[in-house]
Amino acid sequence: CHTASGLPEFIKNGGTVVFDSRGTTLTAGLGARAPTNGFACTTCHDGANFPERYAVASVPFPSGATIGFEKDADGKFVPNDSNLCIECHQGRESTSSVNAALRGKDVDTVDAAISFKNIHYFAAGATLFGDLAKGIYQYDGQTYNGQFKHGDLGPTECKQCHNVHELEVKVDVCAQCHKGVAGIEDVYKVRGPSDADFDGDGDVAEGIKGELEGMQAALYEAIKAYATKAGTGIVYNPASFPYFFVDKDGDGQADKDDKGAVIRYNAFTPRLLKAAYNYQYSVKDPGAFTHNGQYVIQALYDSIKDIGGDVSKMTRPEVK
C-alpha cells in the first residue's frame, strides 16, 4: 500500500490477508519492496489496457471476510472501481485478530506480553462495511450495524464522495442533500436523521462528528482511569508510534527511561487493550463519522461500558 507497484502485484498474484493463531496479520501475494514517494498511474490503472482500471470483484479483509461493493443478480461479486480503494483502506487488524492475540488470557490481569495492536490508518473500508468487516473491536454479546446506507443514496461507494485522484471530499455532492453545505466545515455539522444524544452532553444539535468526538473523549478518560487503577498510568499520543505510553505520575506526558526515550505502554490487560484499540481506530479514521458514524459510536459505547466508564447519560445507537 505504500508503493507504486505493490497493489498491481497483489492483485495479479491473487493476494490474501489472514491472521495466525497469535493474532498476527499476514499478507501473501507480493514480495518485499521499499516504500515509494507517491503512486503511479499504473498503481490503479491497468498498463496493458490503459486507461482501464484493474478489475477487482472482491477484497480480502484482515477479519477473514471477503467483501465487495457490487454483486450480480445471482449474488456473485463483480468488479467495481471502489474495490481498488479498499484493497488498502481496510486496516491491518480486526475483532478476530485481537481475540486471537488475547485468547486464554484473564481479562483484567496485567500481561507484559500483550503489546498494542494498531488498526493502522484510514481504515475507511472497514468502517464503511461495519459488521461485515469487523475492523473495529466488536464485543461479545453485542450486535452492530453492517454496511452503511447513506440516506436515500443507500450503500455508497468511495468514488461517489471522494475525488479518486486527490481523495478530497466532493462537498458539492454532499450539498445536493444537505442544504447549506458549502465547505468541509459544514459537513462536520451534519447531524443525520437521529436526534439521540449519543454522547450524553445535552447537545442534540451538534453534528454526528461532534457526537462521536464526545464518545472518544469519554472513552479516553475511562481508559486512563482503568489503567491507573490497574497499576500503571497511561497516556496517548496520536503522532508517535506505538501511541500509548506509560504515565505513572498522571501529568499527561509520557515517562522516559534513563536514556531519555519514552516508555511504550507495557501493562495492558485484555480489557484495556480492547478499549485502547477502539479508541485508536476511531481516531485514525477521521472520516468515521460519515463512513459509518453510528457503527463506530456503538463500539465506543461498548468500550466505555466494558472498561468501567459512565454511560448512564449516553445512548447506544439502535442496530439498523
Image (cartoon, grey):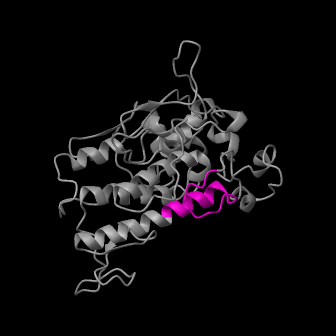
To which quarter of the image does residue 153 belong?
top right
Taking the image as shown, residue 254 lies to the left or right of residue 42, namely left
Q: Is 172 within the magenta?
A: no
Expressed as whole percent of the image width and height from the top left, the position of residue 253 reads 38, 82
Determine whether, in the image, residue 251 is placed left or right of residue 197.
Answer: left
Residue at 53%, 52% (x, y): give it.
315
Q: Residue farthest to the top?
A: 74
Q: Is residue 56 visible?
A: yes
Q: Residue at x 51, y 53 (%)?
A: 122
Depth check, front residue: 7 or 138:
138
Horizontally, residue 227 falls left or right of residue 183, namely: left
When the figure is inspected, residue 126 is found, relative to residue 73, above or below; the finding is below
Q: Is residue 233 left or right of residue 309?
A: left
Which residue sits at x=80%, y=48%?
175
Residue 112 in which image quadrant: bottom left
Point out the image quarter for the C terminus: top right
Region in magenta: 196-216
Q: In x, y percent, where is residue 243?
A: 38, 67
* Image location of residue 147, percent across then percent down: 54, 35
Asked whether 108 or 313 is in front, the reply is 313
Image position, residue 191 (x, y; %): 69, 52
Kindly tell me whether residue 4 is visible in this rendering: no
* Total tally of numbered discs in the picture: 0
Is residue 200 on the magenta stretch?
A: yes
Quadrant in the rendering for residue 265: bottom left
Please say if 276 is above or below 178.
below
